[in-house]
Image (tube, rainbow, N blue to C red):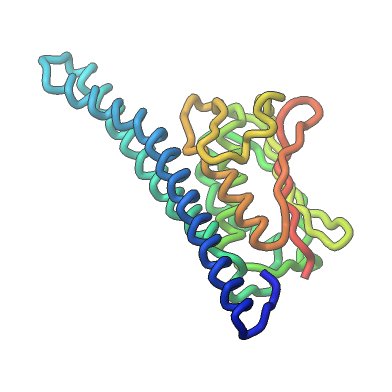
Amino acid sequence: PPALGDNEIGRVGEAMARLRRALDGKAYVEDYVQALTHELKSPTAAIAGAAELLGEDLAEADRRRFLANIRNEAARLQALIERMLELAEIENRDALDCPQVLDPAALLEEALDSLAPQLERRGIRLIRALPVGRIQVQGDALLLHRALVNLLDNAINHSPAGATLEVSLQTAPGQARCSICDRGPGIPDYARDRVFERFYCLPRSDAGKGTGLGLSFVQQIAQLHGGSIRLDPREGGGTCAVLSLPLA
């Protein structure tokens, strides 16, 4: 709002601004509650159904299968709750608290190291092109690490076993661009405008189901840093996630 001064008009303007913030917050909470309730229905129903069947006389193989279902759905519930808390924390921030000058190549290396077991388990070959010590951005190291881990995890989950994952870092006028390119099925045209919506999921190559919050989380972090995130179709199949950040 404009600076109206310490007078009656200024006090009315400040009161209107507080009212707007309160109404925006109410709509935000209502939207979150409705979306979260919808997403919790499926795993909750699956857990309840499996628990009910376990009360019956079942073969040992069926009992193990239903126990595995309960564990998997409970893990998904936990992931949903944790991601929702993380996203809510980011969305309620207007600016970074203590931005630092950072090396995006080092951040990418750290993110890759944390996902090395997952890459090895899926047999995914990594091709990296990361310059050292020449590019700097300003931001929050922890948030950018989490954003990169989310993008890498998303690429791994949508890549077929034994595929290739290409990670690179380049500069454009005033920007550092981190690219993570997979050889997954790509994003269908009907989903291209929705991939950053909360809870929107596409099928994964490992037949699992994500939370649908990872890309929304990355988008919030990018915007908080004055940057952007986009998903581009890749020639020959697959997707390139490009995280752009202002140069320090």
Q: In front here: 21 or 80?
A: 21
Residue drawn at (61%, 69%), measured in percent from left and top?
96
Query: Is 141 drawn above or below residue 113 in the view shown?
Result: below
Residue 182 picture quarter: top right
Q: Position of residue 137 (x, y in %)?
A: 73, 67
Split into 4 quadrants, where in the image is the N terminus?
A: bottom right
Q: Position of residue 112 (x, y in %)?
A: 60, 51
Residue 195 picture quarter: top right
Answer left or right for 222 relative to 93. right
Number of marks in picture: 0
Q: In front here: 17 or 54?
A: 17
Query: Is 232 drawn above or below residue 223 in the view shown?
Result: above
Answer left or right for 10 relative to 212. right
Q: In front here: 77 or 91?
A: 91
Residue most toward the front? Answer: 8
Residue 224 picture quarter: bottom right
Q: Position of residue 84 (x, y in %)?
A: 44, 49
Residue most toward the right? Answer: 173
Q: Position of residue 180 (x, y in %)?
A: 70, 44
Query: Is 33 drawn above or below residue 176 in the view shown?
Result: above
Split into 4 quadrants, where in the image is the C terminus?
A: bottom right
Residue drawn at (66%, 56%), measured in percent from left and top?
222
Answer left or right for 99 relative to 206. right
Answer left or right for 204 relative to 132. left
